[in-house]
Image (cartoon, rainbow, N blue to C red):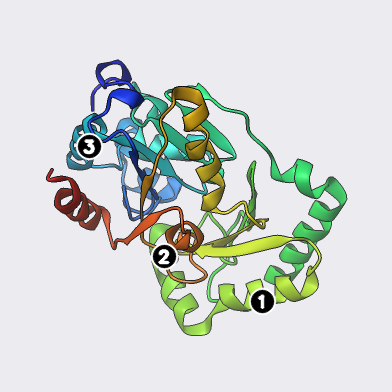
């Protein structure tokens, strides 16, 4: 993919009032795999980070000459760098807009925008009560396998995993099938809603093994405020916002932005499906 400097300025793109926003997992790349997967397969650090295919990068590069592009994901920037960037190329140079943690950490043309944080919003005392309850709940559920890192703190949310984020790729696959049958995550989300009705939190099930908890309104639609602010920055008003994601069903972490009246949503099943739809929409 070309360096940012070779692309036209946002106001000079051929379709300047259009932006394409992408989910990351199973939209631009395969879903993230745990570190012990790479260790067991003896992959180099370079191969670990290059989870996005060369074909996808080439297509995104061609698209970027036509219109603005960006991604929005719940993970932090470090994880997105591993998936979308390379050891020598920062992910913030590969997209016009980079929205980590649903846009709470946001970059425009490689420069950091003003952000926000979950802990400042909720407060330390409420946060401790929430985490303590989650750990007690997980300790009492009976599932075939439990590993480690059951609650992961992020800037804009917490990610909760009944099996633990340290599970191997096979354990993740097995848990996903078990969860579909027994609805472990769905039941835990309902229990959280009943226990903390006044916390103002939204719960979103995504990926294979976990779900996110974040302030209501801090779903992926949060990033749209940065897109809308472009009118005051460069004079470009994005009247067409295409969003591509795989978890677009109700309760999935792409649902809110997919259904938002400001976006045109495209439900995809895989990176290959994303490339197919882009080809049809933009003649790439």
- State the residue in front, 67 or 269: 67
Q: Earlier in the sequence, mark 2 or mark 3?
A: 3
- First in sequence: mark 1 or mark 3? 3
The residue indicated by pointer 1 is 190
Q: Is residue 248 above or below residue 24?
A: below
Percent from the top left, x then y, of residue 280?
Answer: 15, 53
Category of crowding for the residue at label 2, using alpha-carbon neighbours closer than 10 angstroms: few (below 14), some (14–19), many (at least 20): many
Q: Secondary structure at mark 2?
A: loop
Residue drawn at x 43%, y 70% is 249
Q: Position of residue 229 (x, y in %)?
A: 52, 34
Quadrant of image for the N terminus: top left
Q: Which residue is mark 3?
A: 63
Residue reaching furthest left?
283
On screen, 189 above or below 88? below
Figure label count:
3
Q: In this figure, which residue is indicated by the disc labeled 2? A: 248
Q: Which residue is rendered at x = 47% and y = 56% of the image?
A: 257
Q: Determine crowd level at label 3: few under 14, some 14-19, many 20+ residues with C-alpha closer than 10 A.
A: some
Residue extending farthest to the top is 5
Q: Are marks 2 and 3 in contact (CB under 8 Å)?
A: no
**Disc 2 to disc 3, C-alpha distance:** 23 Å
Q: Are marks 1 and 3 in contact (CB under 8 Å)?
A: no
Disc with the residue nearer the chain's start (1 vs 2): 1
């Amino acid at each position: 993919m070309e360096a940012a400097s070779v692309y036209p300025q946002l106001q000079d793109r051929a379709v300047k009032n259009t932006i394409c926003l992408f989910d990351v997992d199973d939209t631009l790349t395969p879903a993230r795999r745990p570190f012990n997967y790479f260790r067991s397969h003896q992959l180099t650090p370079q191969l670990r980070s290059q989870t996005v295919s060369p074909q996808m990068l080439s297509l995104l590069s061609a698209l970027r000459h036509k219109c603005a592009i960006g991604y929005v994901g719940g993970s932090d920037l470090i994880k997105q760098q591993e998936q979308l960037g390379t050891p020598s190329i920062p992910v913030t140079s590969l997209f016009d807009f980079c929205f980590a943690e649903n846009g709470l950490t946001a970059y425009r043309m490689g420069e950091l925008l003003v952000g926000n944080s979950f802990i400042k919003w909720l407060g330390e005392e409420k946060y401790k009560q929430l985490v303590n309850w989650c750990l007690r709940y997980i300790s009492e559920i009976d599932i075939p396998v439990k590993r480690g890192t059951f609650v992961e703190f992020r800037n804009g949310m917490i990610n909760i995993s009944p099996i633990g984020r340290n599970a191997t790729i096979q354990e993740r696959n097995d848990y996903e099938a078990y969860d579909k049958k027994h609805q472990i995550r769905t039941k835990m989300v309902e229990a959280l809603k009943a226990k903390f009705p006044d916390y103002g939190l939204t719960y979103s099930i995504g990926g294979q093994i976990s779900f996110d908890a974040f302030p209501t309104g801090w779903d992926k639609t949060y990033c749209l405020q940065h897109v809308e602010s472009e009118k005051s920055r460069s004079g470009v008003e994005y009247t067409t916002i295409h969003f591509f994601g795989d978890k677009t069903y109700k309760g999935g972490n792409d649902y809110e932005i997919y259904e938002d009246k400001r976006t045109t949503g495209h439900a995809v099943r895989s990176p290959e499906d994303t490339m197919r739809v882009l080809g049809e929409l933009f003649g790439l």
